Amino acid sequence: MNIPKSVWWLVIGMALNITGASFLWPLNTIFMKEELHKSLTIAGIVLMINSFGMVVGNLLGGFLFDKLGGYKTILIGTFTCLCSTTLLNLFHGWPWYAIWLVLLGFGGGMIVPAIYAMAGAVWPNGGRQTFNAIYLAQNIGVALGAALGGFVAEFSFNYIFMANLIMYVLFAIVAITQFNLEINAKFKPQDSIDLKSKENKKRFTAMMLVCAMFAICWIAYIQWETTIASFTQSINISMSQYSVLWTINGIMILVAQPLIRPIIILLKGNLKHQMFVGILIFMSSFLVTSFANHFAIFVVGMVILTFGEMFVWPAVPTIANQLAPVGKQGQYQGFVNSASTVGKAFGPFIGGILVDTFNMSMMFIGMIILLSFALLFLSFYDKVLPKNFKNQHQSRRRRNQNGI
């Protein structure tokens, strides 16, 4: 299936949004420690509050999508981001930096679920392909923002703040001119949605099981940015070599899609089975990396990890779109994004406790055990769904299989 033009604009918008955010993400701790002279503990607390701001933004963004529509919701989030980045350029001392950072997380948190929900609404037959395109856009944004951010920061952090603002201005232009889309999905008035119906309760329970699985996967995944990153330094792997690992990750996500397509076709587009495969690949990545004592093994571990995320990450918002009752698509995408943010927030804390209390080996074992629980949640998520819902979903999957 060819991706509609309206979805392409959402993909471009997501890439601009995440590129802007990624100028700051990798450098927040460095700026607070080196420029603002704050401890790593203080920096960690600020980043955790930022994560909770994103969670609130995710939930509010999803709620507003269902109430106001995607266009107005994205504009509210964009206006919040523009205000916070403008203020960040003008006042980036302490404590203003922390305040604007949390506000930026809140605004950005509103935008992401709204884009996902809008993509699902404007192309309801796109299935996994819709959300895979958005997922690729996010990764392009992360790669571009992080790479350009490091280069720009060599000159001055002030240029980072300016670049961040410019990207949000570009995103605002795209959002204002291209996101006022005609949604083909049949939304019911909010009052007509029977949230207490038996079927909707079962859908909500299934969504919470998927979110628990997703949060656990992120708790494990984020170790590659925290405890494993620290571990590489302790065995004399350079920062430039560690950066190569994420370069490999980004390149693979863009070019290795054809390699997983035969497996997706073999699984007949079954998202649950795809995620099972992905989580098992995650577990094997941690198993392999637990034996790493030189760079080549970390490369192998990262390659395995990347294949795992290519199966899991796009499948989760696709499932959320399928589970959402009519008129609740935004909130369900908000739940998904909140789950990932919670995993990112608590992952470093959990991994740090395991390493500090025991050792790196115990961290790897702990993540494999946690991922086993993710498999358990995934096993049960569709068991609670009504039979007629599963039959409808299977019919839809067969119709869309050629476009996956």
Image (spheres, rainbow, N blue to C red):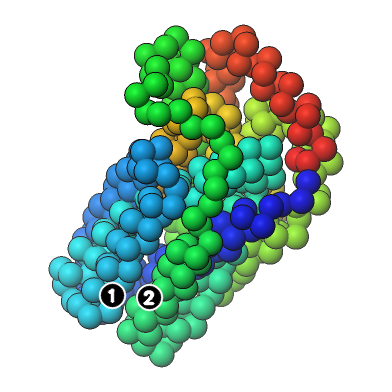
Label 2 element class: helix
Q: Which residue is at the front of the view, 14 or 217? A: 14
Q: CA distance from mark 2 to mark 1?
A: 7 Å
Q: Which residue is at the front of the view, 332 or 298? A: 332
Is 35 positioned to the left or the right of 1 in the image? left
Quadrant of the rendered image containing residue 80: bottom left
- Residue 258 place in picture, x, y as percent: 81, 51
Can I make out residue 5 in this image?
yes
- Which numbered disc, 2 or 1, marks the residue that appears first in the sequence? 1
Can I make out residue 281 in this image?
no
Label disc, if present, on residue 165 of the rendered structure = 2
- Determine whether 55 is above or below 242 in the image: above
The residue located at (67%, 22%) in the rendering is 393
Q: Which residue is at the front of the view, 208 or 195? A: 195
- Residue 329 place in picture, x, y as percent: 48, 35
- Determine whether 264 is above or below 92 in the image: above
Label disc, if present, on residue 104 of the rendered structure = none
> Mark 2–mark 1 contact, CB under 8 Å?
yes
- Residue 275 place in picture, x, y as percent: 64, 33
Quadrant of the rendered image containing residue 314: top right
Label 1 element class: helix
The residue located at (62%, 67%) in the rendering is 247
Residue reaching furthest left? 95
Q: Amino acid at mark 1?
A: Thr
Q: Residues within 10 Å of mark 1 (few under 14, many from 20)?
A: some
Label disc, if present, on residue 86 of the rendered structure = 1
Is 83 positioned to the left or the right of 72 in the image? left
Q: Quadrant of the C terminus?
A: top right
Is 28 positioned to the left or the right of 98 in the image? right
Q: Amino acid at mark 2?
A: Leu
- Residue 380 place in picture, x, y as percent: 55, 17
The residue located at (33%, 84%) in the rendering is 158
